Amino acid sequence: MDGGAAPPNDTEMSDAQPVAAAAPPADPNQQVPPPGGIDNIPATLSHGGRFIQYNIFGNIFEVTAKYKPPIMPIGKGAYGIVCSALNSETGEHVAIKKIANAFDNKIDAKRTLREIKLLRHMDHENVVAIRDIIPPPQREVFNDVYIAYELMDTDLHQIIRSNQGLSEEHCQYFLYQILRGLKYIHSANVLHRDLKPSNLLLNANCTPTEAELGFLNENAKRYIRQLPLYRRQSFTEKFPTVHPSAIDLVKKMLTFDPRQRITVEDALAHPYLNSLHDISDEPVCMTPFSFDFEQRALTEEQMKELIYREALAFNPDYDSSSSAFDPGAFQ
């Protein structure tokens, strides 16, 4: 996942240790022996051996049988649980996010649909990639959504909080890669509303990848309008040891009026990033993202079907024995 310029010589972190896969038992109802060291995560084959159920701290994690044990929880949030697992068909380790009861709230369901469509549209080294949408065992019992992403090693928040020092070259490299991804996102007519260190994932070469894309909305505008006025802080006084060129770029990127704010293209060409900037290796999205699905109210069943179709796009040979969807629902 290295894009653009090479990272500084001392940016490499230790590679993530590979996880060994255990073969599933012949008996579909037999419990898969837990992997060494993770004996609290039992796994059981289900639905005739087509799926595997993992019990992760009392939460059922049910994925297609190609995601062999062991499985490792790596994160948890309001949306659900994230686990790393091995796709035995591709040999790739992925991060699988479970969104439990994904259709109970229409706003959350639409957010999930939006994320899937957005990331499927994007194809860039600095934007996290979806590897799979895991279809449900039965179409008419479709409540939880499982999304498999490329597995990254850490995030910028963890790097900043660690004892690992960051040189000027590190900062330039991180900023360049972030802007490189942002240029691609903007060229698709999409704004990233939540750029923060914890949403900037890094691989073993410290190449940042942007995750958790979102959209600005009227609530965000109202929030901004109600904020009290604050006196502008002097970056030079606050960060006296930072290079003046870096201060200049940050000032231009944080200009409140978007009409006067520096564009991502001009930010990439700023003198602070001279040593990394290469316009021939800063691609754009050739097709703007379509927001057509946002233009009408969707029922719960329609959102289920749209996400189910996205799952089938990743799994064209998947055969759900019971699909109760009525095509007339979209008419």
Image (cartoon, helix red, strand yellow):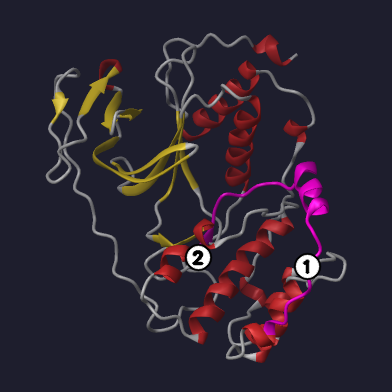
Residue interval drawn in magenta: 209-235
Q: Quadrant of the C terminus?
A: top right
For disc 1, the neighbor class at 10 Å (few under 14, some 14 to 19, many from 20) is: few
- Kindly tell me whether residue 180 is visible in this rendering: yes
Mark 2 nearby-residue class (10 Å; few <14, some 14–19, many ≥20): many
Q: Which mark is residue 208?
A: 2
Judged from the image, the secondary structure of the residue bearing numbered disc 1 is loop
Amino acid found under the numbered disc labelled 1: Tyr
Residue 149 placed where, x, y %?
45, 46
Residue 232 painted magenta: yes
Which circle's residue, 1 or 2, is located before the other in the chain?
Answer: 2
Q: Residue at x 46, y 25 (%)?
A: 144
Q: Is residue 240 toward the left or the right of residue 230 in the image?
A: left
Pick the residue in front: 284 or 226: 226
Identify whether 63 is placed above or below 299. Answer: below
Residue 251 picture location, percent across and down: 74, 78
What residue appears at the point 63 percent right and 36 percent down from the top-left corner?
111
Residue 83 numbered tag: none
The residue that label 1 is drawn on is 230
Q: Where is residue 125 drawn, in percent x and y?
A: 53, 61
